[in-house]
Image: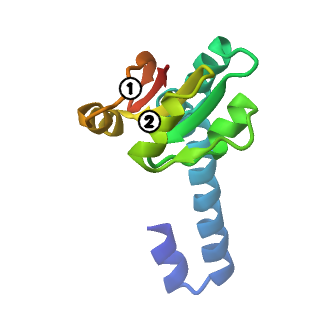
Amino acid sequence: MSLYLFNRSRYYGAIFLLIVGMMAGGFFYALRVVFPLVNPHKSARFICQEITSRMQPGDKVAFYGDFEPGPYSFYTGIVPIPVLEKEEALSDFLRSQERVFCLTKLRDLLKFQLAEGAPEFRLIARRGEEIVILF
């Protein structure tokens, strides 16, 4: 309503300030209200804490599927974390001599379990769609 009235009376400076104020208010509302509500559900911090609490020197970590490794590298301190795109690469990774952790999504894990010759693994953590498997 204010925007309409300012436009009718040709107060263009006030229109600009009103729009900037609305954007700033929306930004601070998102920063103080929306992001803290979403953080427990979408943050990589919690699953990374689970991984790092169980890791020992010499253990390896990888992703399987469509992950953006940035947040996970930040919270684990491991740079770079390899991303495995094919089932064969995941099978080879899980069959390695070292103890390995693999972060994947539930739908990718279910598809991998159905594949023939898939190695045995153990599920150690799940947070939403993200799960960590250990071999």
Residue 91: image tag = 2
Q: How many marks?
A: 2
Name the quadrant of the N terminus.
bottom left
In this view of the protein, which residue sits in the foreground, 105 or 121?
Answer: 121
Can I make out residue 38 in this image? no
Residue 78, above or below 11: above
| Whole-percent x, y for residue 41 in the image | 46, 30
SS at mark 2 in the image: helix
Left or right: 15 with respect to 41? Answer: right
Q: Residue tagged by mark 1?
A: 119
Front residue (pair 81, 72): 81
- Label 2 environment density (alpha carbons within 10 Å; few <14, some 14–19, many ≥20): some
Q: From the viewer's perspective, is residue 114 above or below residue 80?
A: above
- Going from N to C along the chain, the mark reached first, 2 or 1, is 2
Along the viewing direction, whichever of 8 and 132 lies nearer the viewer? 132
**Residue 22: image x %, image y %?**
58, 60
Q: Which residue is at a point 46% across and 39% down the rendered structure image?
A: 90
Tell me which residue sits at (39%, 28%) in the image: 128
Mark 1: which secondary structure? loop
The numbered disc on residue 65 is none
Q: Amino acid at mark 2?
A: Ser
Q: Are marks 2 and 1 in contact (CB under 8 Å)?
A: yes
The three-letter amino acid code for the residue at tag 1 is: Pro
- Residues under labels 2 and 1: Cα distance? 6 Å
Residue 130 x/y as whole percent: 44, 31
Residue appearing at x 56%, y 28% in the figure: 96
